[in-house]
Structures are given as C-alpha cells and as structure tokens.
Image (tube, rainbow, N blue to C red):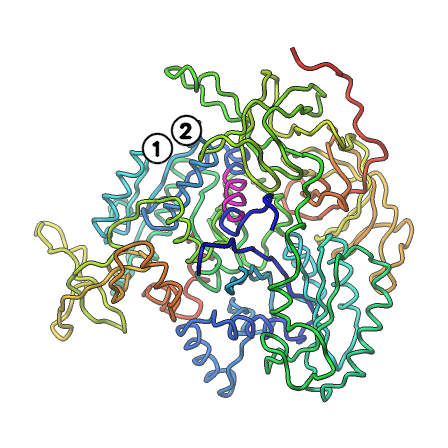
Amino acid sequence: MSANHPIELLRFNTCGSVDDGKSTLIGRLLYDSKSIMEDQMEALERSADITGGGQINLANLTDGLRAEREQGITIDVAYRYFATPRRKFIVADTPGHVQYTRNMVTGASTANLSIVLVDARMGVIEQTRRHTYIAALLGIPHLVIAVNKMDLVDWSEARFTEIRDEIEGFLPKLSSFKDVKFIPISALNGDNVVEPSKHTPWYVGPSLLGHLETVHIASDWNLSALRFPVQWVNRPNNPTNKELHDFRGLSGQIASGIVKVGQKVMVLPSGMKSTVKEIWTFDGSLPEAFCPQSVTLQLAHDLDISRGDMIVGLEGLPGMGTDLHARVSWMNQRPLQRGKKYFLKHSTQTVQAMVTALESRIDIQTYDELPEPAELAMNDIGVIRLKTAKPLIYDGYGINRLTGAFILVEQGTNATIAAGMLYPALEAVKPEYNDFAI
Amino acid sequence: MSSYHLDHLQYLETEAIHIMREVAAEFERPALLFSGGKDSICLLRLAEKAFRPSDIPMPFLNVETGHEFPELIEFRDRRAKQLGAKLIVRSVDEGIAKGFVTPTPGQISRNQLQIPVLLNAIEEFRFDCAIGGARRDEEKARAKERFFSFRDAFGQWDPKNQRPEIWNLYNARLNQGENMRVFPLSNWTEMDVWEYIRQEKLEVPNIYFSHTRDVFRRAGQWLPVPPPHTDSTKPDPFAGGRPKPNEPIQSMVCRVRTIADMISTGMIDSPATTVDDIIGEVAAARVTERGTRADDRASEAAMEDRKKAGYF
C-alpha cells in the first residue's frame, strides 16, 4: 500500500434482527476483500465439519465467543478490521435481538455509517424501525439499507421497491441523515456485496463495498466553533529546568473546530479570556490544530484551569447550565425513575445528576412520543429533564456529537446505564468577565 | 481532501492518546504493561505523546514466564531506562517460590501461570488500572473487548456483562478491589502497528528481523532451541521445551512475527531485515499473527478462557 495518498478511515456498524445475515455479510466483506487468513479459514473448515455438516459458515468468523457459537447468535459487539487500497474500515457487528439493543448504541455511537439489514422475505419489521431510529438518534451521517436474501425472493425488483418505499415513508420523521442508500444484496452468495450482481440488472448503483469506499466522509467532523475540553493538566514541575518548570499545559482532544496560535479564547465555566500562546505536541509546536487532534495548549495567562473546564472560541459560544433536556437510551434492568440520582459523565467531567422529569417515552413502531411515562425500562428511549450539581458546558447533540453527549452511571454498581443526547441550551453562555485576564 | 483531515494512523493515534490521558486523569495508581514486544513499544510512544513534557505518570510492569528471549529482556530494560520510567518485573518463578503459583503437572507452557503473577502484582502495588497493548484484530475473543475492560475483585472478565462503551465517554468508576484493563490499541491492526513503527522510527528488538537460529519442528511450528542449561543446582527451566531425539535441530533464516516466550513462539521463515520488508510480508501474509502462537492454538476458545480467568 503506498503512502503517497492518505488512507481514510470509515467506521460503520451493521444491524438487523436475528438471522438477517449480519455476520454472514461481514464474513463476506472480509472474505471477498481477501482479509480472511488461511488459519482462520482452517478453523472455519474444522467447525464446518463438526457443526455445519461440511458447509463453511462465514458467520463463525465474527461469532467469536463459545456461547455465541453454541446458541448461534451474536451476544455482544464484535469489532472487525479490513482494508482496501482506498480505505481502512472498522466494523462494529451489533446484535439485533431486543435485549441487546444497548450494544447497538455502543457499536453505533462512533460510526460514520450504519448498515441496516432487511430480510427481503420479512420486509420491514419492528427491529428495522428500531435500528433506523437509533442510527438517526445517534446522529450517524450516512445510512445504508441493505435488502438481503434477494435470492430468496427471485431477485424481485417489485419486492425491493416495496421495501424501499415503506422505509422512505418513515425516514422524513427521522430527518438526520446526510445520505441514504438502498442496495439489493445476497450476503450468502456475494451479490452486490463486493462485485455488482448479474441478477439485478434493474439496480443502478454501486455495490455495498463500492459505496463504503466512496461515500463522502471528509466533512463528518465538526470544524466550526472551537470546543476543547481540558482533559489533563500537564505540569512537569521540573525544578532543574527553568523552561519546564514554568510549563503549564492543558492537554486534551479538540471536540470541534480549529484552534490557532494567537487566537483569543474563553475558559468556561469561569468566563476568563486569554490567548493561545503555544500548541505543543511531542512532534513540535503547531501553528494550528483541529478536531479530533490531541494537543497540549499553553495560554498567555496563568489561569486556574483544571480537568472538566472547557476552552472555547469567542464566536459561537456553547450553552452552560445545570438544567438539562435530553433524549436517553436506557440500558439497565433497573428502570429510570424520577427523583433518582446518578453520576453523569460529559466530556471530561463527572457530576451528580438527578432526574427531575420524565417527559415522554418514544414508541419505536410509530416514532410517537408518549407523554409522562412512569419509568423508562431497559431498551426504552425517552425524553427527560435532569438537574446537575455543577454546570455543564455543552452543545446540542445534533450540532456536536462530542459536547452534546453524556452517559449515566449507577451509584453503587458503577454500571453504565444510559446514553444521553442533549437538546441545545435555550441560550448561550453569558460570561460575567469581559476583560482579558491580567 | 481538505487540509483539516487526519489519515488513518493519525486518527488511531489521537484516539489512543485520549485514552491514555483518561487513564492518567481517572485512576489513582495505573501501570503500563511493557513486555518489549512491538505493540507495547507503540504504547510507550503514545505515552510520550500523551504526557510529555511531563514524566510518564505511571510505572511499567512486566510479568516474566522465565522462558523469555534474552534479546527481549535486554531491549525492555534499555527502553524503560531511556524513558526514565520505573520498571517493575515479577516472574512465574518467584510466584512458584512464594507458593501462590502451582504449575500443572506435565504442562510446559507457563502462559497460564502468568495470570496469578499478574493479579498478585496488581494487589502488591494496589494498581487500579493496567494499560495493555492488546488489539481486537488479534483474536476472536479480543474482538469483543472494550477499551476500558472491567475486572472484578478476582480479575475476571465477564464478556456477557460488559459496560456499554459509548462515544469517547469511558466509565472508569471502580469499587474497592476491582480494577480496569485499558487497551488503547484496540482498533489497531498488525499492519497499523508496523506502519506506526515505521512512521515514528521506533526501535524494535532484533529478533523481529531475519537472523540465523537453531530451530526444531513441533506441532506444525518452528520452535527456537532454548539456551543451554548451565546451572545444574536448579532444575532445567526449559525442561520439556527442548527438542526430543525425534525432533532434529536445523539452522534456519527466520524471525518472530509475534513474541510470547521461547516455548510458545513459532519462528517464521523470512528474509525480512527492515521494517519495510516486514510491512511487505504483513501485506502478503495468508495466516494471522496469532497463527504462530502455540498458546492460542490450544483450542478455539483458548483466549476466551484465559481472559475470563484474568489474563490481559
């Protein structure tokens, strides 16, 4: 592989219900892109002799755990890696059955693209609507509806169109995708997966891999307003080296925007202003840096800044406050209840939070909001209000996937029990300090 | 393509640096597992990128089986010293002497025996987190790992009860006695590791490059002939790992692709003498890296079982 042109990385996840052929599809992508090695093939052949009556089962490549092989299901998110000369791919294989929806949220939260599999025979089922909804909820920019097992409906264009029309009928309610692609495939036989299929002369469009290689992802990162959550204060405190002794760095990963040397910035929640003196990295200082680079900033003034603070540009200020309004995906056996306290982790800070209201639960079938539920159960998605012990500095999730997201952690067990997506604040920060720090 | 764009190695790097800094910020007593192998060599560079110009805020820890390649030990010690880090070494032999490790009769490999030694070291130093260089592409059970892998008070991994890991919001909260394993290289492939070694011009132990060595054939692998047993006052540490009369010794131009210890690392027939050569071999490889590891070939679920017991 030549290093002459940069290789882009695309992260995608696959979802569908049990037996939609997700694992088979990933197996097919790996197999046809020659990413399966001989010893893996041997292991597959061995298991084929034992359990498969001699048929090689591509699903065994991803169903890694013993329990999965025994039950023939995928019980957790499995990550796979493959590359073509154009792109590298990280695949999260996320299971479809109802009780493991939390894993789909896990696998999809960092994805650029979601592939929702639909069994051509079954058509659109509850799981299809659920997975499409979650992909939209998580703000995944690109969606692919792969209509699988087309061989079992005689490659019927009418059936494909019927499924596409039904999905296009409810997509406007979700309205968050940059692009949506429908592709008729047979994962088992490889039709339209890597190579175009002879069986679908009526389909004009790329194969699935062709689409994955070319879909435009360069603008998926947010490069508008600067958000730099301070992650770790970098103070060498070296008594023998004057320069190092005075070094006061603020290390973190840029969550959005671009930072430049000389740029005026504001530190929140204090509202103090300063200018960027240096963008320090191990490989030397930079004139500018951008999302999602990890850097260490030195400011012109020695301000009291710690983990959990956020450095922002003066244009496009974020929201700040203790009253939050959010959609949550609930992931625990014990339901979410009003009045309960949780730990809330947002960017680089963890605060205590109390649920003050359950506004609605979302019906996955109709996408309707059902008002004032008594609780949210495992796999429910709902709209809630929270009060935090300290103010958060945040954006709406629709604008910024990193500063608009949080998790809830149960006190006592420390289990991660919810993924939260914030609505934008009603008004932006109004800092009390207007002068630069002295 | 815009200039505000990261290529895949830069993306993997910034993801890993972010994870390293989360560890430093969220845990009280973290350690970094450093064996001298290629993956942990990358971890050290990422630690430099995450924490410089400060010191790397955690000691390095290595668990020896007692069957290590001498070249690896030499490299490990030298590299830790270069970086000014504290290196803690604990060994299976020590564990046997102190009585908390009991070898299985007839079992030559000490891979399993590293588990109690690691858990003991975690307890001895009260580490609440250990950073490791494991990658999801290595093995099927590892493909299901989180970046932050929660372990109970017995060091066990429960694959059915993992914490959902959403966005880059890692839940690092622990109760007394529990600990975390953290894998910043989770999303890296073998190719990414070598491309990163090339990009960063990192030194690796010379056994990764082609050399001439005495080997013998066992269970489909070319195993290195261990160094001679010189101290007759002690039992031969390589007993069982030496060639039998029906396993003829031959000289071979070879190298390692992955390093366990001398008893479980198969040598590969290779003329690769540079990192570029190795990258060429990885690109053309038709078997996985772990295909040369006797410890993983034990069964389809060998890694899954070891991880559940506390392996990293």
Chain of the residue on which disc 1 is drawn: B
Quarter location, residue B98: top left
Count up the numbered dots. 2
The rendered magenta stretch, by its main secondary structure, is classed as helix
Chain to which the residue tagged by mark 2 belongs: B
A67 shown above or below B58: below
Q: Nearer the viewer, residue A374 or A435?
A: A435
Query: From which residue to which does the magenta span run?
Result: B11-20
Disc 2 from disc 1: Cα separation:
8 Å
Q: Quadrant of residue B31?
A: top left
Q: CB of mark 2 within 8 Å of CB of mark 1?
A: yes
**Tag 1 secondary structure:** loop
Q: Nearer the viewer, residue B152 or A357?
A: A357
How far across and how far down the image is residue B67, in percent? 23, 54
Residue B74 sits in which quadrant? top left
Question: Does the magenta segment cover residue B260?
Answer: no
On-image quarter of the C terminus of chain A = top right
Residue named by callout 1: B85
Q: Quadrant of the N terminus of chain A?
A: bottom left
Q: Position of residue A4 (x, y in %)?
A: 46, 54
